[in-house]
């Protein structure tokens, strides 16, 4: 059975604004073969777009096993076009103790924290806290709320929709994420507003 290449319009819409921030933040991860772990690569569109535009980094996409066949189509296409710094996707379930073995300098994840159940969000921060070096960055993109307040009516509606689908999902509150991140050894160094009421949170390992 032939797999069709998956497509996310949201990824197409947000990839350029996210990249502009990543190019600035990840300049510091510039030693040869610095590796970035992407958690929850989904379709693979972000990895395929970012890697050739961040040529000083090695980009490692990951996701749960059932997403990898579609993701791989985007990755292989980008590699064939010359993105030699883009690795083939690997399986990663943050709730499992075994993570891909690589010396990562930074990590990136988009639109995962509100889809993951809370134990998985905790596991993501905890796992990265164990594996990222001091000063390493974790760049987390998505919608967030602040002190219980949504940043837009559309985000509030989206949050309600998520929780109706699955009570374990929902837009995360920065006031709750910060203590979790601190316990994992991270501090919030930047909070970038991006289009469509999304944010790119930059956490740095202490």
Image (cartoon, rainbow, N blue to C red):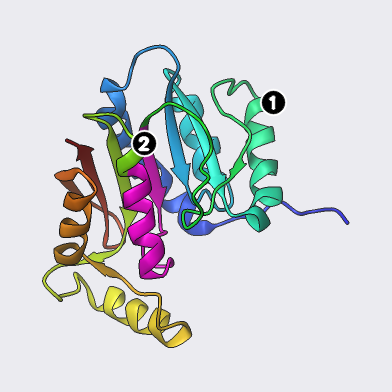
Q: Using the image, determine if residue 146 lies above or below residue 199.
A: below
Mark 1 or mark 2, which is nearer the start of the sequence? 1
The answer to which image quadrant residue 107 occupies is: top left
Residue 196 screen position, x and y as percent: 31, 61
The picture quadrant where one finds residue 78 is top right
- Residue 98 at what x, y percent from top left? 53, 45
Q: Residue 165 has which mark?
A: none
Q: Is 17 on the left-hand or right-hand side of 35? A: left
Drawn side of residue 63 relative to residue 121, left or right: right
42 to 151, vertically: above or below: above
The residue closer to the viewer here, 70 or 14, is 70
- The residue at the point 49 percent across, 30 percent down is 59
Tell me the residue that label 1 is attached to: 80
Front residue of this view, candidates 54 and 32: 32
Please state the extent of the stretch shown in magenta in the rendering: 106-128
CB contact under 8 Å: marks 2 and 1: no
Helix, strand or loop at label 2? It is: helix
Above or below: residue 81 compared with residue 140: above
Front residue of 2 and 174 = 174
* Residue topped by disc 2: 131
The percent position of residue 154, horizontal first and vertical second, equals 30, 76
Name of the residue lying farthest toward the bottom: 164
Q: Kindly identify the residue that appears in the image at 35 percent across and 74 percent down.
A: 170
In front of the other: 14 or 70: 70
Disc 1: CA contacts within 10 A as few (<14), some (14-19) or many (>=20): few
Distance from label 2 to label 1 (Cα)?
A: 30 Å
For image coordinates 50% across by 25% down, the residue present is 52
How crowded pointer 2 is (Cα within 10 Å; few <14, some 14-19, many 20+) is rated as some
């Amino acid at each position: 059975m032939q797999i069709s290449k998956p497509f996310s319009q949201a990824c197409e819409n947000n990839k350029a604004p996210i990249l502009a921030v990543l190019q600035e933040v990840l300049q510091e991860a510039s030693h040869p073969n610095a590796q970035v772990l992407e958690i929850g690569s989904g379709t693979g569109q972000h990895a395929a777009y970012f890697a050739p535009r961040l040529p000083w980094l090695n980009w490692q996409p990951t996701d749960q096993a059932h997403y990898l066949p579609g993701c791989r189509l985007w990755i292989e296409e980008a590699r064939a076009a010359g993105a030699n710094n883009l690795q083939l996707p690997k399986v990663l379930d943050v709730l499992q103790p075994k993570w891909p073995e690589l010396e990562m300098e930074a990590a990136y994840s988009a639109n995962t924290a509100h889809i993951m159940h809370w134990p998985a969000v905790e596991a993501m921060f905890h796992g990265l806290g164990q594996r990222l070096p001091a000063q390493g960055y974790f760049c987390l993109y998505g919608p967030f709320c602040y002190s219980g307040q949504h940043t837009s009516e559309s985000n509030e509606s989206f949050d309600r929709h998520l929780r109706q689908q699955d009570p374990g999902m929902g837009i995360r509150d920065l006031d709750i994420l910060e203590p979790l991140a601190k316990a994992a050894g991270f501090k919030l160094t930047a909070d970038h507003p991006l289009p469509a009421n999304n944010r790119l949170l930059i956490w740095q390992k202490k």
